[in-house]
Image (cartoon, helix red, strand yellow):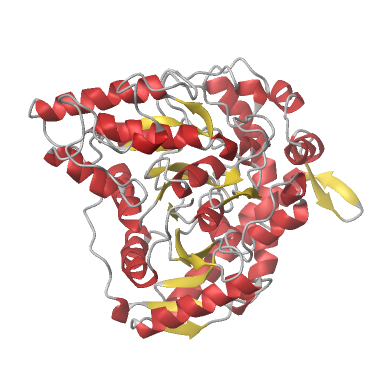
Amino acid sequence: MARFSLPHTCSTLVAAAALSACSGPGGLRGTPDIDSLTATEAAARICSGTLSSEALVQAYLVRAKARPELNAFVTLDETGALQAARAADQRRAGGGACLPLQGVPIVVKDNIQARGLPATAGTPALKNFVPAADAPVLQKLRDAGAIVLGKTNLHELAFGISGYNPAFNTGPQPGVRNAYDATKMAGGSSAGSAAALGARMAPAGLGTDTGGSLRVPCALNGCASLRPSMGRYPQAGIAPISHTRDTAGPMAVAMADVELLDRVVTGAPALLPADLKAVRLGVVPGFLANLDSDTRGAWEAALARLKAAGVTVVDVTMPQLAELNGKVGFPVALYEAYDDMVAYLARYNTGVSINQMAAAIASPDVKGTYDALVIPRKLPGPGGLVDAALIYQAAMTVHRPALVKLYADTFASQRLDALVFPTVPRTALPATPEASSLENFGLFIQNTDPGSNAGIPGIQLPMGLGASSRMPTGLELDGPVGSDRRLIAIGLALEKVLGRLPAAR
């Protein structure tokens, strides 16, 4: 492992020249524009012999090391990535069958295990935990030819929406920073993966999502992502919060790459973009609360373009949605967090107990949650903290089934492909400890959390830069359980209407 050391291959490369061809048989036959290159395009060029994996990995490594102030990586695996790239080029030169992700570098959130690399989950107590095997979801991508460029930073233990984590930093200021403005938060919890994609340190990657952690940071950093239907992706080898709510998912610079990664993980057939004239979307008024002017302007413009492209948009109501969601979200996540983490720490022989881990938590917001709620198994109730067991039982046996039914009935009665709404109500906040406040947490998951608790799939794609802030805004579609591939097909079509955001500068 090497962290931000100069590349050894083509050692005269500097940042400005990194996209030029290296000499020798492994060099570029064409210069990649990594600001616009997608993972799908990169794989095709590597397979055709017009681009070498080694030169592509070099270019991304130089870009990653050029922006240490973003704190995007916990571990940048320069040595391992270059070795894998050379092997990919040798495989192609030897006539091996082309793989779907042949030689394409990806980034991996550091709560997902990657063999031979630390799996810190963004917390100090796990900084020396190095798993011997990939998490199954990552193994599927490696088997398809993907190369792990590095492990990305995150909101500590995935317990937050800002990405402001003081534990692992490569730049002078703490916390993962937004690719478009390093004074702003990256969003969480998959902060490092989203910042890396926005800054074009990689074309695609993996994150995880409990209540918005794939979609919130992509909304704020201009990338696309999928929260899969619950249970669709394997969850072994991933530091947990809640087995009822957690899922891994793909993140990428383009919807075509989300489609490709999802296809590799699930074995689904390839997709074409949906016919937007056959798409019916619902708008729930409550999802339009608390929008800032930039987000509202981007939303209204995006909705007008969708309608002009032939999408049918209808207003729908979902009575008791907020009430039901409130009775499910925190009770489930905070109760399951204890048992699930205890099991994880033991199963993978981390050598760390949950009490040791909690004692070393670096982020005040996460430590407060663990010390007051997770470890003692408590939840806020009338008059103070109360035992969580009965609240959790009611959430799982009464309120969550009601929430699931509400979504299913809404989709069926209104004949909807999906609900559509702004992913988050605001553009990125300043990257300060205050970004991690409970108030901001609730604000930034107001639209992503309900579908998460119902176990349904959701896609996020950019809907433009804010008129005044020039910061990314995001559009989300939540569909019926199991409709992941239909959502992706719609996303492919919508991206053609809305366009992709330019790379951050």
Q: Quadrant of residue 17?
A: top left
Between residues 503 and 112, which one lies in front from this camera angle?
A: 503
Determine whether 279 is above or below 27 in the image: below
Q: Quadrant of residue 168?
A: top right
Q: Is residue 17 left or right of residue 403?
A: left
Tell me the residue at 32%/59% (across/down): 485
Determine whether 199 is above or below 104 in the image: below
For the question of whether residue 398 can be seen, the reply is no
Determine whether 159 is above or below 430 in the image: above
Between residues 242 and 398, which one lies in front from this camera angle?
A: 242
Q: Quadrant of the N terminus?
A: top left
Tell me the residue at 73%/46% (across/down): 432
Q: Position of residue 427 (x, y in %)?
A: 61, 62
For the question of whether residue 207 can be seen, the reply is yes
Q: Is residue 96 left or right of residue 250?
A: left
Q: Position of residue 280 (x, y in %)?
A: 39, 79
